[in-house]
Amino acid sequence: MTATFIYSDRFQAYDYGGGHPLRMIRLKLTYELLRAYGIFDAPGVSLVEAEPCTRAEAETVHDTEYLDVLKGIDEDRLPISPARYGLGYGDNPGFKGVYAGSMFSTGASVQAARLVQSGKATSAFNIAGGLHHAMPGRASGFCYINDPAVAIKLLADDGLKVAYIDIDAHHGDGVQHVFYDTDRVLTISIHESGDYLFPGTGFPNDMGEGGGRGYSVNLPLLPGTGDEVFTWGFFELVPPLIDAFRPDIIVTQLGCDTFLSDPLTHLRLTTHGFVKMVEGMKALGLPWVALGGGGYDVGNVARAWALAFGVMAGVELPDNLPESYKKLLKQNGIEGAALSLRDPGPTPETQQEFRRARQVAEAMMLRIKWDIFPVHGVRG
Ligand SMILES: [Zn+2]
């Protein structure tokens, strides 16, 4: 068993700019936390330097014209109508380095896919990846190049069946879009309902089209949903569908913007619910490409992804955070971060909120079981 962590300090060079919620420091903090725990010296664990993807790899998913626009920004050639490509101020600024940085984070996902495909790694984790909103011809939701889609496309083009499991707070719309009409890729996304959160899609009836009908699976959840209902949804959906689909490889998006303290979303997960699902992914017993994703409370991101890599590596990390890591938090002005690796306990469920969240989740699940499970021969 080998769990590989893919990283480079060069990720820090690609900065969305002051005030943007997606902060690159979260990647460094995650790496430094794992390093301080000494996990990279554990048996069966390897650390690999990230490399950029090639233009041809990016073009398996993205339009040439759009990639040229991104590259132009790096070379000080600004597009005449940036909005046409989803670019501009706000969510997707056209910052210098946007092309090189996106090729780099995508390259690390391609590396993860290749390592797992070749059997050199049982699991591989690219925390800089998981940018699931990017569309073939435009940027969306902080994402420019859709690294999960590129990695999955390369694997599928090699004849592999791939299942994509996305537990980010937001719907994995870009990945779903790319594979909407194929039965070679199964996408499952569990997220805060599009009625309340960007990108506004991801309902049970978004279930694929043509030959792909029944191969896009979406479970939207109410704001306020905590550990119990979210993980219930995961275990109701993921193991039976994966058992029936029998993929050669799984690609998972481990966004941790589902957490209680996340400033952009309204779910209420803790490390307990998150880890339970990561353990559920491991228990599927399949070659496993793990990617990062959202997460805007920086202190949570490092803890969640350190725990996730601990699960991949089979290493139980102690709750006490290393002193060197606490110092790093301070140096970077990150205040109020939890000082224990795990949250004290699962989400406390207030009666009323909990009942509503569960009722809605059950109703959505019934729809999925009615419409989609029969496509896969699964009894609901
Ligand atoms: Zn997200």
Image (spheres, rainbow, N blue to C red):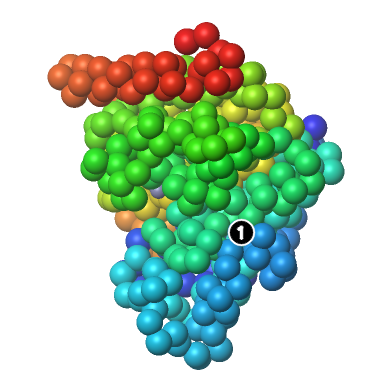
Q: Position of residue 271 (x, y in %)?
A: 43, 33
Q: Residue at image x 26%, y 22%?
A: 360
Closer to the camera in the image, 325 or 119: 119
**Relative image position of residue 187 (x, y in whole percent):** 54, 36
Q: Position of residue 96 (x, y in %)?
A: 49, 82
Query: Residue at 80% across / 32% down in the picture?
Result: 1
Say if residue 82 shows up in the picture: yes
- Foreground residue, 39 or 254? 254
Q: Is residue 377 above or below residue 151?
A: above
- Hey, which quadrant is residue 68 in on the image? bottom right
Q: Residue at x 59, y 51 (%)?
A: 149
Which sits in the foreground, 107 or 31?
107
Q: Amino acid at mark 1?
A: Val
Residue 262 can be seen, yes or no: no
Q: Is residue 167 above or below residue 59?
A: above
Instruction: Determine whether the beta carbon of the residue marked 1 sits less than 8 angstroms from the nearest atom of ligand 1.
Output: no
Residue at the image position 63 percent from the left and 19 percent from the top: 244
Callout 1 secondary element: loop
Q: In the rendered image of this protein, does residue 329 appear above or below residue 378? A: below
- Would you say 98 lies left or right of 93 here? right
The residue identified by callout 1 is: 61
